[in-house]
């Protein structure tokens, strides 16, 4: 158990109908379920539309983010997120393919898991290596969060001042460092 409450950052995405409804309904239902594991009032981002990643991998995504607090371990939080994905009918057939629900554990406080060396290895993989390789353990912070507008734009709604423990940049700084074309692909859909 974590000895004190830590902020947990979670990214949500859907580009396929699920048992919860269309992609927006799926993300909203998942956010409400995940809110139940928070020890304090969760913070919800607005909803955004983004092209599938990689480009052409399917319909546009509905993306959002959430900040919660918990005393659960990171692996326990990840297990709960996988349970919510399964409730929505998520299957893992194709890496970065179309999906009913994608919940990514982005960060837990200032934790670097399992260690800086392993984090750095996964962070430095090329795009091709990232698509064909998946870690067999939890890597925190998410090793590609700093490259993804569909993660950073919603995260800036809920934790703009959270500082990446390796890069030493806030969510806002990482978002603002992205190419303008990447940021332009993320369009606001409305409040959660």
Image (spheres, grey):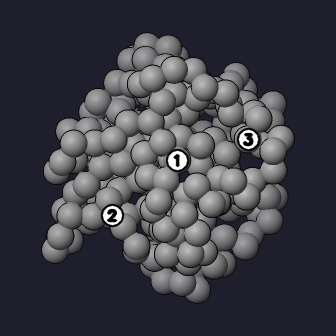
- The answer to which image quadrant residue 125 occupies is bottom right
Judging from the image, what secondary structure is the residue with disc 3 in? Answer: helix
Front-lying residue, 177 or 2: 177
Q: Is residue 65 above or below residue 77?
A: above
37 with respect to 125 (left or right): left
- Read off the residue under disc 1: 156
Q: Is residue 40 above or below residue 161?
A: above
Separation of residues labelled 2 and 1 (CA atoms): 21 Å
| Residue 183: assigned label | 3
Percent position of residue 114, x then y: 45, 78
Percent position of residue 152, x then y: 59, 49
- Read off the residue under disc 2: 74
- The answer to which image quadrant residue 171 occupies is bottom right
**Could you tell which of marks 3 and 2 lies nearer the N-terminus?**
2
Circle 3 Cα neighbour tier, 10 Å, few/some/many (<14 / 14–19 / ≥20)? some
Separation of residues labelled 3 and 1 (CA atoms): 12 Å
132 with respect to 65 (left or right): right
- Residue placed at 63% from the left, 60% from the top? 173
């Amino acid at each position: 158990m974590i000895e004190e409450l830590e902020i947990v950052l979670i990214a949500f995405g859907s580009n396929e109908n699920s048992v919860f409804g269309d992609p927006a309904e799926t993300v909203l239902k998942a956010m409400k379920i995940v809110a139940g594991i928070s020890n304090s009032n969760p913070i919800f981002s607005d909803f955004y539309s983004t092209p599938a990643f990689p480009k052409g991998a399917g319909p546009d995504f509905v993306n959002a983010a959430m900040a919660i607090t918990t005393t659960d371990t990171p692996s326990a939080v990840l297990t709960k997120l996988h349970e919510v994905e399964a409730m929505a009918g998520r299957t893992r057939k194709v890496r970065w393919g179309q999906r009913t629900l994608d919940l990514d554990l982005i960060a837990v406080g200032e934790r670097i898991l399992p260690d800086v060396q392993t984090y750095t290895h996964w962070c430095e993989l090329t795009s091709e290596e990232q698509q064909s390789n998946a870690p067999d353990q939890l890597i925190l912070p998410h090793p590609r969060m700093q490259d993804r507008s569909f993660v950073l734009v919603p995260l800036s709604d809920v934790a703009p001042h959270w500082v990446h423990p390796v890069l030493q940049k806030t969510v806002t700084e990482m978002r603002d460092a992205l190419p303008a074309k990447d940021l332009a692909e993320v369009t606001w859909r409305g409040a959660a």
